[in-house]
Image (cartoon, grey):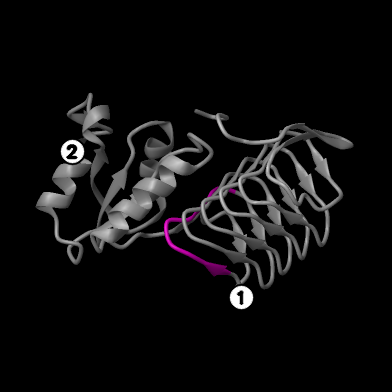
């Protein structure tokens, strides 16, 4: 049984604890948070430590990590912590819920979660540090770049490229053979039928651009 520390102790971290506890052989020994967020000693019956103590007290070869930070600051906080701990030589696990159907040809990076009841088809590529929430479809030969957050019930058609750090809102649809620029927000329920070449915030059906930059969203 491999020891695992979950970095992040909010709602997402607690969800990940439940996933790992219920459907894997990982032994979650602790949550870890940055010192400025340290407000608890115990959550879900296991200790909470600081990230600073994690780095000091644990050898990378003895444990594995999962960074469970949400889409705060357009996924930048999750990216920052993942890259920071990676520099110290720690390795990161990925998790696929047993109810999801993931084709054997799919390539999945580190620190990825695919939650309940997703379908991920042939030749899909998912980068590092990606969150795929419940009930969606990622169709054939689509590429999800690093640090993306895909909200529940999203449908992404084939031959799509989702750029780094983007946020795909709940119940949104992205049609076939399109590019979505890095750091783009797709609002919930939107239908994207044309390539989005520039960062921004896009909503609606038909979709429209409502802001030129995603900077400041989810801060």
Provide the residue designation for mark 1: 105
Q: Considering only vertical position in the picture, is 11 above or below 198?
A: above
Query: How packed is label 2: few (under 14 Cα within 10 Å), some, or many (20 or more)?
Result: many
Compared across the picture, whether 104 is left or right of 46 comes to right
In-front residue for pair 129/152:
129
Dominant secondary-structure state across the stretch colored magenta? loop
User: Which residue appears at 57% of the width and 34% of the height?
Assistant: 215
Q: Residue 115's spot in the image, x, y percent?
A: 54, 48
The residue shown at (33%, 34%) is 9
Q: Residue furthest left?
A: 57
Question: What residue span does the magenta drawing correspond to?
Answer: 107-116
Q: CA distance from mark 1 to mark 2?
A: 38 Å
Where is residue 185? Give x, y as percent: 66, 39
Q: Residue 195 at what x, y percent from top left? A: 81, 53
Residue 139: where, in percent of width, then height? 73, 61
Element class at badge 2: strand
Which quadrant is the N terminus positioned in?
bottom left
Answer left or right for 194 relative to 89: right
Q: Which mark is residue 49?
A: 2
């Amino acid at each position: 049984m491999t020891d695992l520390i979950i970095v992040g102790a909010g709602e997402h971290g607690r969800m990940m604890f439940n996933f790992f506890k219920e459907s894997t052989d990982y032994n979650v020994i602790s949550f870890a948070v940055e010192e400025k967020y340290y407000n608890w000693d115990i959550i879900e019956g296991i200790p909470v430590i600081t990230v600073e103590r994690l780095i000091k007290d644990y050898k990378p070869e003895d444990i594995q990590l999962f960074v469970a930070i949400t889409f705060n600051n357009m996924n930048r906080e999750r990216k920052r912590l993942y890259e920071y701990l990676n520099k110290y030589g720690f390795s990161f696990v990925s998790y696929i819920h047993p109810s999801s159907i993931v084709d054997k040809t799919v390539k999945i990076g580190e620190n990825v979660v695919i939650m309940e009841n997703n379908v991920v088809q042939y030749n899909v590529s998912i980068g590092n540090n990606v969150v795929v929430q419940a009930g969606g479809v990622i169709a054939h030969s689509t590429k999800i770049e690093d640090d993306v957050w895909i909200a529940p019930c999203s449908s992404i058609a084939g031959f799509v490229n989702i750029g780094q750090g983007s946020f795909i809102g709940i119940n949104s649809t992205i049609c076939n053979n399109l590019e979505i620029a890095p750091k783009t927000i797709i609002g919930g329920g939107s239908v994207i039928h044309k390539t989005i070449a520039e960062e921004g915030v896009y909503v609606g059906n038909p979709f429209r651009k409502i802001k030129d930059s995603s900077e400041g969203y989810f801060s």
